[in-house]
Every structure is written in structure tokens, then in C-alpha cells.
Amino acid sequence: MASDQSGKAQFLVGDYFVDPYPVYRKLHEESPIFWSEIARAWIVTPFDEVEKGLDGDDVFNQSERMTKASSHLSPDQLSELPHILTNLSNWIVFKDPPAHTRLRRLISKSFTPRSIATFEPKIEEIVSKLLDQAMSKDVFNLVDDFSFQLPAIVICELLGIPLEKQWDLKRWSDGVAGFTASARITTEQATHAENVAREAEEYLMGLFVELRKNPNDGLLSKILNAPKDDSGDALTDKEIVGLTIQLFFAGFETTEGLIGNMVLAMMNNPEQEALLRANFDLIPAAVEETLRYDSSIQKQSRVASVDLEILGEQVKKGDYVHFMIGAANRDPRKFSSPDTFDIARKDAANVSFGHGIHFCIGAPLARLEAKIALRQLLERLPSFVLHEPKPTFPELLAVRKPLQLWLSS
């Protein structure tokens, strides 16, 4: 008997995590929405439905997402996860209005394009120093030597956290990713996430005490020592812990993956690399095309708050729905030649940072880091030459990024 070669049968199995895009292509043709038993969720792939779903706060909610993702764990198992569950409950991305509105209002002024632009000289300096160190070797790992360290250092500088904590931040972020980005959370992932969440909270609570005694110029110090706003409102320490770990996770996964995916796209499309090297004015367009072509964030999820219909399928109140960003960005109904990497694309668009009130608060920072990184890489490397071992990718539903990328200096 021939094996089932449908998109539904190949979703989250086999070579899906190496290259999910052939599966997405089949899903667009055969099953633009379907119920996945592996993910225990509806899978939605068309661009218009994904964009509408991410903006559908009248029919979807965020606050039940982690409950749904961990619903297969027993009450006893959940009772052993107080730190990770409490931490995630304080992430802005898992909040619904009015709680979401309150948290976003208290933090958003620190992430406006204007405020982020003031950080540009510092990012230029960080990128330059990291590439000096990486290129002192004949062959270097773009991930460990550069694309991870760049957002790690930027986040430390931005928040006012000692730079020597960057590897702890990486470990904490990866532990949280195993809980939030998996298709199905294992007991081992849950236990590890709980341990790192507890460790991160203990460190941050101690740091908060120090920053109240000895303020610095970082964002955490400003938040901790800020007077209450006109409403008399302020963030609690638990909320600040949650916000900080969310920034670790979002900053690492988005920017680290974007840079790695961008360099891979250039190497796999040398004519586009040549076009970019001939015209650096196309760098912003190259970043946006990478966000479309190979987004480091592959999905965002919602829980249906009412019964509704999507493309003829009956979605019940309480159903988990995965809006597949990576598939939406390759929708042939939205984009001409969607599987072609084209930095001069006329129909450029993407939903890689989400849509609506939950649009990624750190998008301006991620874009700025990526543009500076790409320009300096192009200036310093006459070509991108890949070395063995070949890149591998994590088996995560929500995150796509090379785990290693060896280049000639």
C-alpha cells in the first residue's frame, strides 16, 4: 500500500522540520484548514484567514493558549509547574484586553521606532565587535559566534542586565521555547521549563532589589523606579519578570532565526545575493523578503471564544487554532511565485510579526538588528561559503532557525 503523501499526513512528521514549505504548498492546494491530531488543533494556512484570525479578538482569546497547550498534562503534573505557568500568564502575548491593553500601554513607549533608533549606534558597535571576534577564525559558526550573541547582548544592554548573564538568558530562553513552541509539550520539556523559569525568577528578583538601590540606564531600572502613571498604575514585580523572559524569548528566537534564515536564503539564491551586493539600498527589502520567505516564527495560536466557521469548517468554542504564519507567507493566492526568494518583489508583505493588537512589540528592534547585521556581513564577507556540517533545525512547531551555520571568514 502506498504511503499517504497528502499535506495533512506529512504535517509535523518526516522531513517537515528540515523544510516545511513543500507541506505548506500541499496544504494550500488540498486542506487550507484541517484538524491535526498531533497538534490537537485546527491548522489554518491561507494568508487572509491567518491575518484575520490574528486580528480576531472578538472571536479568539489568548489567555487560554497555555492551558490548551498543556491540557494533556495531569492536574498533578500541572501543580508541579507553578513558576513557568505563572511566568507565562504574565506575558503580554498571552493576555486579552483589558489586561493586555494595560501591560502594552506601560511598556510600549520603550519600543517605538523612534526610541529604538537611538540604540542604532550601539547595535552597530556590537555587530562590529562580534564580527571581529568571529572572523578571527578561518571558519566560524554564524549562530554561536554571531546571530545568537547579537540579540543577547542587545537585550542585556537594553534591559540593563550584566553581559555575563547572556548565556544564562540563552539557556532560560531555550527552556521556555521547549514549552511554548512545541506542538505537544512533553513531561521532560515541562519539567525543564519549570526549572529554568524558577532560576530566572530568582535571579531577576535579586536584580530588581539591586536596581532599586543602584539604578542604571537600562529599561528594567526605568520600569522599576518609574513613578506611577496618571492612572496610578504600575507593573508588579511578577509582571516585570514575565515581561523580561518574554523579551528574552522573542528577542532571541526572532532575531537569531531571521539572521540565520537570511544568510541561508542568500546562499541558496546567489543571483539575489549578487543583486543585493550591487545595491545596499535593497537591504531593508531583503530583510522583509526573508521575513516572508522563511520566517523564524512559524505560527501564532488562539483559542476560539465562540463557535465559528473558517473556510467551511465548524470551529467550536474552546478549540485550539494554529494560524500558520510560515504557510500564510507562501500563499499562492496572495503572492506571485511564493516559493521564489525575490528581494525586489512587487507584492512584498508578511505576517511574521503578527497582526492587530498583538503585533510584536519588538518588531522595530528586530528589523534594525537584522539590517545592520546584513550590511556588515556583506561588507566583510566577499561571499557566503557554507561548510560542513550542514545546518539542522529544531523540531519545534513555532520556531524555525538553523542551529548551526558554518561559514568561511
Image (cartoon, helix red, strand yellow):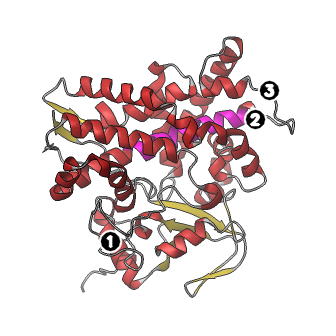
Eye-nearest disc, 2 or 3: 3
The residue drawn where x is 50% and y is 58% is 184
The residue drawn where x is 48% and y is 47% is 178
Q: Real-space Cα distance between discs 1 and 2?
A: 43 Å
Query: Which residue corresponds to mark 1?
Result: 338
Residue 227's mark?
3
Tally of numbered discs: 3
In the image, is residue 254 part of the stretch drawn in magenta?
A: yes
Q: Quadrant of the C terminus?
A: top left
Query: Which residue corresponds to mark 2?
Result: 235
In contact (CB < 8 Å): disc 1 and disc 2: no
Task: Looking at the image, tell me whether mark 1 or mark 2 is earlier in sequence order.
Answer: 2
Q: Amino acid at mark 1?
A: Pro
Q: Give the side of residue 379 with respect to residue 35, left or right.
A: left
**Residue 329 image offset from top left, x and y in percent:** 41, 67
Residue in front for this viewpoint, 79 or 149: 149
**Residue 67 image offset from top left, x and y in percent:** 65, 57
Task: Looking at the image, tell me whether mark 2 or mark 3 is earlier in sequence order.
Answer: 3
Name the image quarter holding residue 7: bottom left
